[in-house]
Image (spheres, rainbow, N blue to C red):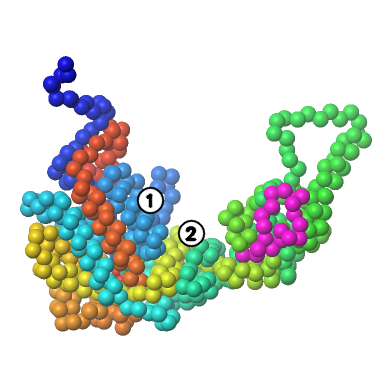
Amino acid sequence: MASDKQPIYILPESTERTVGRDAQRNNILAAKLVGEAVKTTLGPKGMDKMLVDSLGEIIVTNDGVTILEEMEIEHPAAKMMVEIAKTQESEVGDGTTTAVMIAGRLLENAEKLLDKKIHPTVITKGYTMAAERIKLLLNQLSVDVTGRDDVLKFVAMTAMTGKGAESVKEKFSDIIVESVKQIEENDNVDINNIKIVKSKNNRIEDTELISGIVIDKERVAIDMPNKVEGARIALVSDALELKTPESEAKISVTSPEQLQNFVEREEHMLKQVVERIKNSGANVIFCQKGIDDVVQYYLSKNNIYACRRVAKSDMENLARATGAKIVSNLNELTKEQLGNSRSVEEVKQGDEGMTYVKGCINPKALTILIHGGSDHVMDEMERAIKDGLGDVASVIKTKRIVPGAGAIEIELSRRLKAYANSLSGREQLAVQEFANALEYIPSTLAENAGLDPIDVLTELKSRHDNQEQNAGINIFSNQVEDVLAEGIIEPAKIKTQAISSATEVAVMILRIDDVLASRSAKGRMPQMPGGMGMPPGMD
Ligand code: ADP
Ligand code: MG
């Protein structure tokens, strides 16, 4: 007969369990802290963060996703927050801070509702309804900019505002717009076609757009030509050296003639390597591995330009740009495998030389060459440029923009509140809280600029109540004004993506009421973002 006792499930001893409200509080707190960690970087007057990794490497940045990626975040709910930043980055390339802040605030506001004994499923339902409503509203409120190429520059400038690129914002915006326009095809833009290379010399102002590929390598020998016009380019992935035997090899040489013979044989084989290259008709060769000295010598004698140890990604870029095929075995190298460009040239940048491959047969191959005095500055410029590229590409693809500087958030919030009032169930409280969460963006923009967030919010709301849909807080003039007219504009996609992923993560976290963690995982849990430590009651 079967036992009538209740079965008892025993968790492995190494498992720690948090249930119900405790689990929820714990997760919400962790997620909220992630939102707060990036808050001070939001907007034009946002501060930078200095991140120091365990090896002492320093990054100075204002970029949400970079900060979150570099922080060693262990808490599972906090990690989910980092994921939204990554999704935002890959979907749009900008708006990461916004997405994470909204998610954090949605959870913080949910906590208030939980305290009022509103069930999590009611909250998640209300949040989902709000997000859907916002999607509709964004469709109505966003502006169609088909055929308005003039706005692209403003989109790029808005993206780069506050990224330390202030003095060069105009120039960078021109470069960004020009490059994206060059690679667009039927409203499709693959920004992977735009390579970003950094060169540590000159000033940031000297940053330039080069139509072609820039490889961070100089020619291997000084006797090679430093410029080749009408380049016929070979791409070889294998080393141009004699293969060294895998295991130790012994050669017994019994006479001087034999030794001489051996050396001559080797040289002959290396010479043949060059013969093969020459016979293919190539006058430029990029090799992914090393090039033997003897090969270098004969290449020079044949006026062939060569670079060695070229990165795999560069080899692929070169293949795409010049039409060359990467060969591993020189026996395969024929005229058909070669690529073409108008010129290949070594350009000295201070002490280092770089190789410019210009006038490629694929006109979509572009390089933005960032100049600057320090790696930290150039890295941050690269992030700013990438934000700009992502935003401009997004507008070209979707044709829809919204006013920035908090204007769209306030308008959405206002309309969402009206929608909440039309609802009868308790979900309306959640929709209301969603609307409140959106105000976090303009109030933080104001706060980070040293303005009084309450005053600014009050003014913004009253202006929007007076049908001034585009009233935002311009952080340069410190005025509430029509920011669309001022050119503070963002792709609508930033907002749709931020809202949908913030809602998704908030809903997911609110649904959790049971956390089972193995002890080893728990041991690492107290490492909260920014070294904030674990608040009481959270262990
Ligand atoms: P994110 O990672 O979310 O893109 P940013 O630090 O780039 O964060 O800040 C973006 C916010 O700054 C957006 O809300 C944008 O509208 C706002 N912004 C950009 N330029 C201005 C400006 N001149 N005045 C006020 N807000 C601005
Ligand atoms: Mg941004």
* Residue 69 horizontal/vertical position (percent): 37, 52
Q: Where residue 52 is drawn, which disc sits there?
A: none
* Residue 303 horizontal/vertical position (percent): 79, 62
Q: Which residue is mark 2?
A: 375
**Is 260 within the magenta?**
no
Per the image, label 1 sits on a secondary structure element best described as: helix
* Residue 493 horizontal/vertical position (percent): 34, 68
User: In front: 494, or 266?
Assistant: 494
How far apart are labels 2 and 1 at the CA level?
17 Å
User: In front: 469, or 383?
Assistant: 469
Residue lying farthest front? Answer: 1
Q: Name the residue at 49% across, 65% down.
A: 190
Q: Name the residue at 47% across, 75% down.
A: 177
Which amino acid type is shown beneath numbered disc 2? Asp
Q: Which residue is mark 1?
A: 70
Say if disc 2 is inside 8 Å of ligand 1: no
Question: Which quarter of the rendering shows the C terminus?
Answer: top left
Q: Name the residue at 18% across, 72% down.
A: 415
Query: Can residue 359 be seen here?
Result: yes
* Residue 262 drawn above or below residue 397: above
Crowding around mark 1 (Cα neighbors within 10 Å: few <14, some 14 to 19, many 20+) is few
Question: Which quarter of the rendering shows the N terminus?
Answer: top left
* Residue 225 drawn above or below residue 312: below
Q: Nearer the viewer, mark 2 or mark 1?
A: 1
* Residue 171 drawn above or below residue 289: below
* Residue 518 horizontal/vertical position (percent): 28, 33
Q: Quadrant of residue 335?
A: bottom right
* Residue 143 drawn above or below residue 374: below
Q: Name the residue at 62% across, 56% down.
A: 315
User: In front: 16, or 451?
Assistant: 16
Q: Which residues are magenta?
A: 321-339
Q: Quadrant of ligand 1?
A: bottom left
